[in-house]
Image: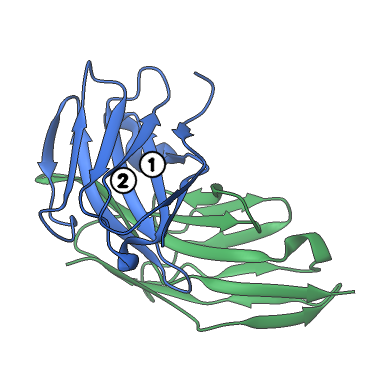
């Protein structure tokens, strides 16, 4: 089956620090990969995505590259801000064939950024 | 509508009572999903709708949980005889079925259910 594993949190950083949140996956075929973000008290928002190997998704200064050889989709940001404090979820969709496109999530990583 | 709308945003209910949670997906989105997020836990899949049918109900925790979708649009998640362990945020999401790999899902803001 499909699964997503994220690095355990919480992650605590100072403002302007470099961020990496590791994500690896297990899936058959060629899944699409996503990062969702959940700010305090809000719903899930799509942060970025990549639909095929070597694609790089980017948004709001965050980046992630779809690495098929290492089955990874690590989230990075060069300089975090206090406003980036949130829970980050790595996820995959494996659609096609008999799969309808169920979104499989990692367990989430809490990020706290201090001034 | 412009986004996925869920109501109520908060619901407090007494143990043993039934509750109904509503989801209004984005207009034209044929696929609809319910997830649950318990405190300190990840996201738990509950059920998937394609149109009005539910080909995957595998995530429903017990027979106290049921869901329906009418007119290919609004969906209702019903929990009968609520228990304290049902307390969670219930999230609804929708997508275009044939574009899900490209666009992913759009989530609503959720319904926070508290069973006292």
Tell me, for residue B92, which label it has, or none.
1
Which tint was used for chain B?
blue
Residue found at the far right of this picture: A115
Camera-nearest residue between B8 and A69: B8
Image quadrant occupied by the C terminus of chain B: bottom left
> In terms of image quadrants, where is residue B2?
top right
Q: Which residue is mark 2?
A: B34
Looking at the rendered structure, the secondary structure element under dot 2 is strand
Chain letter for mark 2, please: B
Relative vertical location of residue B72 with respect to residue A27 in this rendering, above or below: above
Q: Are marks 2 and 1 in contact (CB under 8 Å)?
A: yes
Camera-nearest residue between B43 and B111: B111
Residue at the spot x=65%, y=64% of the render?
Answer: A86
Residue A81 visible to an observer of this rendering: no
> Along the horizontal axis of the image, is B30 left or right of B55?
right
Residue A50 on image: x %, y % = 46, 51
Looking at the rendered structure, the secondary structure element under dot 1 is strand
Camera-nearest residue between A45 and B58: B58
Residue at the spot x=47%, y=45% of the render?
Answer: B110
Residue B81 visible to an observer of this rendering: yes
Q: Which chain is green?
A: A
Residue A27 on image: x %, y % = 24, 65
């Amino acid at each position: 089956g499909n699964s997503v594993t994220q690095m355990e949190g919480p992650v605590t950083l100072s403002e302007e620090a470099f961020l990496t949140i590791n994500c690896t996956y297990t899936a058959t075929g060629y899944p699409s990969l996503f990062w969702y973000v959940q700010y305090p008290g809000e719903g899930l928002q799509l942060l970025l995505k990549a639909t095929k190997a070597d694609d790089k998704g980017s948004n709001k200064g965050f980046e992630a590259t779809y690495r098929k050889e290492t089955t990874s989709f690590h989230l990075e940001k060069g300089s975090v801000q206090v406003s980036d404090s949130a829970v980050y979820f790595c996820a995959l969709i494996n659609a096609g064939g008999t799969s309808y496109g169920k979104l499989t999530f990692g367990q989430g990583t809490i990020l706290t950024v201090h001034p | 509508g412009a986004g996925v709308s869920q109501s109520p945003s908060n619901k407090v209910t007494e143990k043993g009572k039934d509750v109904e949670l509503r989801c209004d997906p984005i207009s034209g989105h044929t696929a609809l999903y319910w997830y649950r997020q318990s405190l300190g836990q990840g996201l738990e899949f509950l059920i998937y709708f394609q149109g009005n049918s539910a080909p995957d109900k595998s995530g429903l925790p017990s027979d106290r949980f049921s869901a329906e979708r009418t007119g290919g649009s609004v969906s209702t998640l019903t929990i009968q005889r609520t228990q304290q362990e049902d307390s969670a945020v219930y999230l609804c999401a929708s997508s275009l079925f044939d574009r899900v790999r490209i666009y992913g899902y759009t989530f609503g803001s959720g319904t926070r259910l508290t069973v006292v």
